[in-house]
């Protein structure tokens, strides 16, 4: 068993180091914020996003399971990147995976999301980032429903929602995060989020 684990780790390391980014592949996303088609100054993002949205999208954080405002959201429409507004997912591909995070089986467009190796926490996962601005969204797993077999496990804090009717969303991302902080025991009156 130990030989198989070492061999599996060796194969993963060889694949990661054989890429152009080399060692950077071991640490997660290989691209930097400067190489994305759309970029924003960090100071602007700190002012515009909630502390949780900033932590998730810019610091590759994760919200607690079952606390995000879009986990049980069922309205028809499209889910967009909270940072740049790029269209990512349709409500038609959303499903309840039981994981505690919004899950989608497919993208609106293949270029909507960029997938890269993530070796954080000593395990190999596939990180998903916005294809336009590089904001961290979540992770991709191969245990989703047919026909794609994919499960895009996405943080609510990285999403905004555009209703199908074109009206205003009944659940805005910042309101959803405020509710999540309240359920998670955070101080909803404070501008800082405790994680």
Image: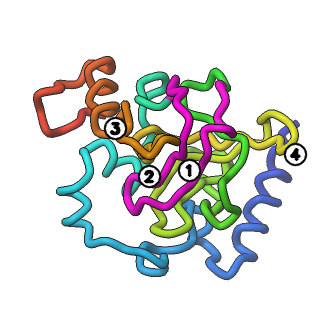
- Read off the magenta span: 71-96
Q: Residues within 10 Å of mark 4 (few under 14, many from 20)?
A: few
Mark number, residue 8: none
Q: Looking at the image, tell me whether mark 3 or mark 4 is earlier in sequence order.
A: 4
Gap in angstroms between the C-alphas marked 4 and 2 = 32 Å
Gap in angstroms between the C-alphas marked 1 and 4 = 22 Å
Tell whether label 4 touches label 1 (CB within 8 Å): no
Tell whether label 1 touches label 2 (CB within 8 Å): yes
Depth check, mark 3 against mark 4: the one in front is 3
Mark number, residue 120: 1
Res. 162 image quadrant: top left
In the picture of the structure, the residue carrying the numbered disc 2 is 60
Gap in angstroms between the C-alphas marked 2 and 1 = 10 Å
Res. 18 image quadrant: bottom right
In the picture of the structure, the residue carrying the numbered disc 4 is 3
Mark number, residue 172: 3
Between 160 and 151, the residue placed more toward the observer is: 160
Q: Position of residue 96 (x, y in %)?
A: 65, 25
Between 1 and 179, the residue placed more toward the observer is: 179
- Residue drawn at the location 17% of the way across and 56% of the way down: 47
- Residue drawn at the location 62% of the way across and 78% of the way down: 21
- Residue 68: within the magenta? no
Depth check, mark 2 against mark 1: the one in front is 2
């Amino acid at each position: 068993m130990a030989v198989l684990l070492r061999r599996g780790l060796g194969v993963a390391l060889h694949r990661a180091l054989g890429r152009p980014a080399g060692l950077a592949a071991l640490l997660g996303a290989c691209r930097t914020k400067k190489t994305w088609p759309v970029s924003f100054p960090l100071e602007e993002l700190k002012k515009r996003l909630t502390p949780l949205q900033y932590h998730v999208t810019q610091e590759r954080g994760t919200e607690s399971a079952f606390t995000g405002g879009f986990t049980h959201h069922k309205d028809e429409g499209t889910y967009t990147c909270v940072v740049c507004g790029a269209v990512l997912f349709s409500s038609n591909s959303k499903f309840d995976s039981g994981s505690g995070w919004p899950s989608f089986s497919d993208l609106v467009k293949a270029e909507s999301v960029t997938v890269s190796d993530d070796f954080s926490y000593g395990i190999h996962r596939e990180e998903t980032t916005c294809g336009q601005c590089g904001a961290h969204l979540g992770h991709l797993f191969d245990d989703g429903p047919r026909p794609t077999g994919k499960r895009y496990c996405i943080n609510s804090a990285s999403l905004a929602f555009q209703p199908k009717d074109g009206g205003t969303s009944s659940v805005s991302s910042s309101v959803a995060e405020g509710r999540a902080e309240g359920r998670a025991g955070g101080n909803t009156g404070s501008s800082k989020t405790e994680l």
